[in-house]
Amino acid sequence: VVVRRIDGYERFVRPVAFRLDPERSHSLVRPYLALHRGGARARRAVSSPLLRSTVAGLALRNPIGLAAGFDKNARMFDRIGELGFGYVTVGTIVPAPRTGNPRPRVIRYPDENALGNCMGLPSDGLQVVAARLSRRRNRATPLIGNIEGPAVDDYLRCHAAIAPWVDAIEVSLRCPNVIDADTDVTSPAGFERLMQALGSRCEHPFFVKIPTYDSESERAERMELADIAKRYGASGVTIAGSFVRDEPRLSIGRGNVSGAPALSRNLRFVSDLHDLFDGQLAIKSLGGIATGHDAYRAIAAGASTVELLTAFVYRGPAVAVKIAEELTSILEREGVSSLDELRGTAPATTADDA
Ligand SMILES: Cc1cc2nc3c(=O)[nH]c(=O)nc-3n(C[C@H](O)[C@H](O)[C@H](O)COP(=O)(O)O)c2cc1C
């Protein structure tokens, strides 16, 4: 059992931040990051030799990434890279500016260490975001650009505009909160057209972000999407580990639940992908990852990396440092000498008991 240290963020900052509307607190992250400094100990923790790996050709100092949705408009990625994440994702980037759904569109479930959101892909739009990316300074932390259409041509435009500034691309399929978009790239036939068009153009490693499932037929369809992605050259799958819940407090009456309740679906998907593709596809485990123990379980189930969004809100800007420390101590205790050695060692059934 990993004992979680109560730190300054959880004790002093979070109670104040949680009195504010979640979007208002998020807008304070940027000024807060200007003050937050990680020390030498933090730098050592996130660079432990045990945590190094190469995933889809990207050399990562640790496997803990920041997921899409935190820095949607590429306003913080340089600074976030300095917080110790192994990689940072910006986006979702869409072709034209969008306002998203009306507020309230983010709520907290503090008792569940979770969030609910129906953001609906608000974005400053491709032109503005690409201009910000072009001013990238931090080249040490790999940067992944998450893009979405809705149409195939839209994906191609987004890809062309951001490719010079990022190290990898992540293809998001239709966000379930976007109720006005009518696109078929989520059906296997539509998705194959997208992959055909993008796969040949993409010189970077690319990942496809695929939702989790609740039924056998959904599971089969997700596996088919992963298989198509692989055939057209995708390096891996990112698990979109949230699920929909009715929520009258949100403007559209429902939202995506992220955080701890999403972990079991995430781990089950990791195991299934690992069983089917046997290491031929990288797996970015996303949904409810919050501790070194979660990361350990995900990698043991077959994940190449773990990434997070909600845990940043609950554990603060040092979340990558905390997880890196916790994961390193479990690896040392278990006598595991690398992430490659750990990967895929847990039988699939253990992933279900999250
Ligand atoms: C407020 C919020 C906004 C999000 N925005 C995006 C987004 O723009 N694009 C995307 O692909 N995922 C988005 N996500 C989903 C996250 O990337 C991730 O899949 C989900 O939160 C599960 O991971 P977690 O449990 O670590 O938060 C968003 C999530 C939240 C909570």
Image (cartoon, grey):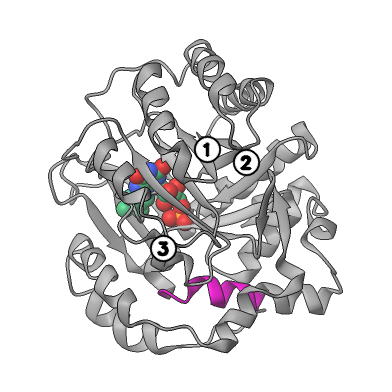
Q: Which residue is mark 2?
A: 269
Residue flagged by tag 2: what amino acid is it?
Phe
Residue count near mark 2 (Cα–Cα under 10 Å), binned few <14, some 14–19, many ≥20 = many
Indicate yes or no whether the magenta region holds residue 320: yes
Q: In the displayed structure, would residue 161 be above or below residue 256?
A: above
Residue at numbered disc 1: 212
- Mark before the other along the chain sequence, 1 or 2: 1
Q: Position of residue 4 (x, y in %)?
A: 55, 83
Quadrant of residue 238 in the image?
Answer: top right
- Of pointers 3 and 1, the one earlier in the residue sequence: 3
Q: Amino acid at mark 3?
A: Asp
Residue at the spot of label 3: 78
Find the magenta span and give its range. 316-326
SS category of the residue bearing label 2: helix
Which tag is nearer the camera, tag 3 or tag 2?
3
Name the element at disc 3: helix
Return the residue nearer the eye: 245 or 225.
225
Q: Depth check: give the residue in front, 327 or 150.
A: 150
Number of the front mark, 3 or 1: 3
How far is mark 3 from mark 1, CA to CA?
A: 30 Å
